[in-house]
Image (tube, rainbow, N blue to C red):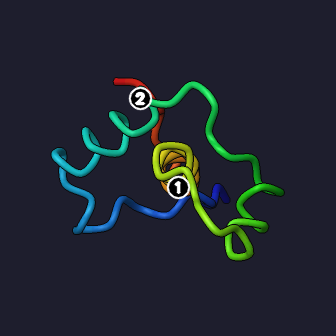
Amino acid sequence: METNTVPQRPKWMTDDTLAELREDIRKCSDPYTDDEMKECQFMDEVDELRFNAKTAMDILTHFGIPFEE
């Protein structure tokens, strides 16, 4: 019996949302690492571009969606 371990794409993840997430990744060549993300809560200033790129990567990875179309 084969089980699917990747969650299905949720209703909120429209084609436009996917395009925005991919654009966040495309805009930033140096997203935060997992360790840096843990430290973000303690930083005075967070680089929004890097933060958004890492978040987008995490979301797409979670749902098994490629970063590029």
The residue that appears at 83% across and 57% down in the rendered structure is: 35
Q: Along the line of sight, which residue is nearer the eye, 31 or 43?
A: 43
Label pair 1/2, CB-CB below 8 angstroms: no
- Quadrant hosting residue 2: bottom right
User: How many residues crowd mark 1 within 10 Å: few (<14), some (14–19), many (20+)?
Assistant: some
- Marks 1 and 2, how far apart in space? 13 Å
Q: Where does label 1 land, which residue? A: 55
Q: Would you place residue 43 above or below residue 51 in this image?
A: below
Q: Position of residue 18 (x, y in %)?
A: 29, 45
The residue that appears at 68% across and 75% down in the rendered structure is: 41
For residue 27, which numbered disc appears in the image?
Answer: 2
The residue that appears at 77% across and 68% down in the rendered structure is: 38
Element type where label 1 sits in the image: helix
Q: Amino acid at mark 1?
A: Thr
- Of marks 1 and 2, which one's residue comes earlier in the chain? 2
Q: Position of residue 37 (x, y in %)?
A: 71, 61
The residue that appears at 41% across and 62% down in the rendered structure is: 8
Q: Would you place residue 22 above or below residue 54 in this image?
A: above
Seen as rendered, the residue at the extreme front is 44
For residue 28, which numbered disc appears in the image?
Answer: none
Seen as rendered, the residue at the extreme bottom is 41
Q: Amino acid at mark 2?
A: Lys
Q: Position of residue 57 (x, y in %)?
A: 54, 45
Q: Position of residue 53 (x, y in %)?
A: 50, 44
- Quadrant hosting residue 30: top right
Badge nearest the viewer, 1 or 2: 2
Element type where label 2 sits in the image: helix
Which quadrant does the N terminus fall into?
Answer: bottom right
